[in-house]
């Protein structure tokens, strides 16, 4: 029954990024290109429904090959399709007719879910022709933004290990493997570790394969010259830059997840001591991502 109602997706596009790296702004821009079909929010609830962390071997949001059973993957694909028909308060009869009744394939499905950094095994099996856009950001600015958002973005599915030595009251953002081992560290150390892990898992997956269905984008380049970045995305994905997309960029929008107004090198003013403390730890990953790391 699930196989019957689940349409085929053709080369879906997934944005991969660490938390607070500007991925919402990139997603909102790309979804205004001519072709994409997308949801208006992240798909986290569906992933957690099919792959609850407490039942996974890693006790995190990392999904291993062993857990990617055909039943789980078919269930998830079907949930994706059903949510495309009815997403929050939006009913899309055109998708219902074209892709469920007429059985046409779904083209240019676009998704941005931060935990997808840890869902790559499942995504590759469900969508073997998918294309991945890896958004990266200067680790110092990224970790600073994660610290700023820690109290506002709580992961309610993460039960902290019971200990009087915990330095935090809750976990925020997706749970990388071994996240429980970090709760006794300072907030800046936790955020730095999480930033490294999100990017490490993605890099190890695609550097190993040297895949042609992967591109990396710098957040700083997107902010400074968005049209050039969009042209690169268009070339790699086949998506068409639309007037709506350009109008959105020209409006200089703030992401709906913005906590404080963007500012160049904001970390130097907001959390300078905390960021300098963790810079030696994040420096190898920054260099791996192509960032020069001055410790000034």
Image (tube, grey):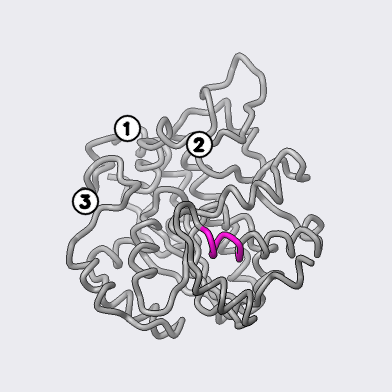
Query: Label 3 neighbourhood size at 10 Å, few (<14), some (14-19), many (20+)?
Result: few
Which tag is nearer the camera, tag 2 or tag 1?
Answer: 2
The mark that comes first in sequence, 3 or 1, is: 3
The answer to whether the residues at label 2 and label 1 have Cβ atoms under 8 Å apart is: no
x, y percentage for residue 38? 47, 66
Q: Is residue 254 magenta?
A: no
Q: Residue sitting at 35 percent across and 75 percent down?
A: 33
- Residue 264's label in the rendered image is 3
> Can I make out residue 284 in this image?
no
**Which residue does the numbered mark 1 point to in the structure image?**
273
Q: Nearer the viewer, residue 73 or 211?
A: 73
Q: Residue sitting at 37 percent across and 70 percent down?
A: 30
Q: Nearer the viewer, residue 275 or 10?
A: 10
The mark that comes first in sequence, 2 or 3, is: 2
Which tag is nearer the camera, tag 2 or tag 3?
Answer: 2
Q: Which residues are magenta?
A: 81-86
**Which residue does the numbered mark 2 point to in the structure image?**
172
Q: Is residue 33 left or right of residue 104?
A: left
* SS at badge 3: loop
Query: Label 2 neighbourhood size at 10 Å, few (<14), some (14-19), many (20+)?
Result: many
Q: Is residue 110 left or right of residue 73?
A: left
Q: Residue sitting at 61 percent across and 45 percent down?
A: 176
Calculate the distance from the C-alpha at mark 2 to the C-alpha at mark 1. Answer: 21 Å
């Amino acid at each position: 029954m699930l196989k019957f109602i689940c349409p085929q997706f053709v080369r879906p596009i997934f944005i991969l990024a660490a938390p607070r790296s500007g991925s919402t702004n990139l997603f909102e821009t790309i979804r205004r290109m001519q072709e994409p079909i997308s949801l208006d929010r992240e798909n986290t609830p569906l992933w957690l429904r099919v792959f609850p962390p407490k039942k996974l071997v890693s006790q995190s949001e990392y999904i291993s090959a062993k857990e990617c059973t055909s039943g789980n993957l078919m269930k998830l694909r079907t949930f994706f399709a059903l949510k495309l028909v009815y997403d929050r308060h939006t009913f899309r009869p055109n998708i219902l007719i074209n892709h469920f009744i007429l059985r046409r394939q779904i083209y240019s499905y676009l998704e941005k879910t931060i935990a997808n950094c840890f869902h790559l095994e499942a995504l590759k099996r469900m969508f073997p022709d998918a294309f991945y856009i890896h958004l990266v950001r200067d680790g110092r600015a990224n970790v600073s933004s994660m610290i700023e958002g820690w109290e506002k973005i709580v992961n309610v599915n993460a039960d902290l290990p019971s200990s009087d030595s915990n330095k935090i009251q809750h976990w925020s953002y997706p749970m990388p493997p071994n996240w429980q081992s970090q709760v006794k560290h300072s907030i800046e150390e936790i955020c730095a570790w999480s930033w490294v892990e999100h990017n490490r898992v993605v890099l190890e997956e695609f550097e190993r394969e040297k895949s042609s269905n992967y591109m990396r984008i710098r957040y700083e380049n997107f902010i400074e010259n968005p049209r050039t970045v969009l042209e690169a995305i268009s070339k790699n994905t086949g998506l068409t830059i639309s007037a709506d997309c350009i109008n959105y960029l020209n409006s200089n929008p703030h992401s709906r997840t913005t906590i404080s107004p963007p500012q160049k090198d904001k970390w130097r003013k907001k959390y300078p001591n905390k960021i300098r403390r963790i810079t030696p730890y994040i420096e190898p990953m920054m260099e791996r991502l192509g960032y020069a790391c001055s410790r000034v």
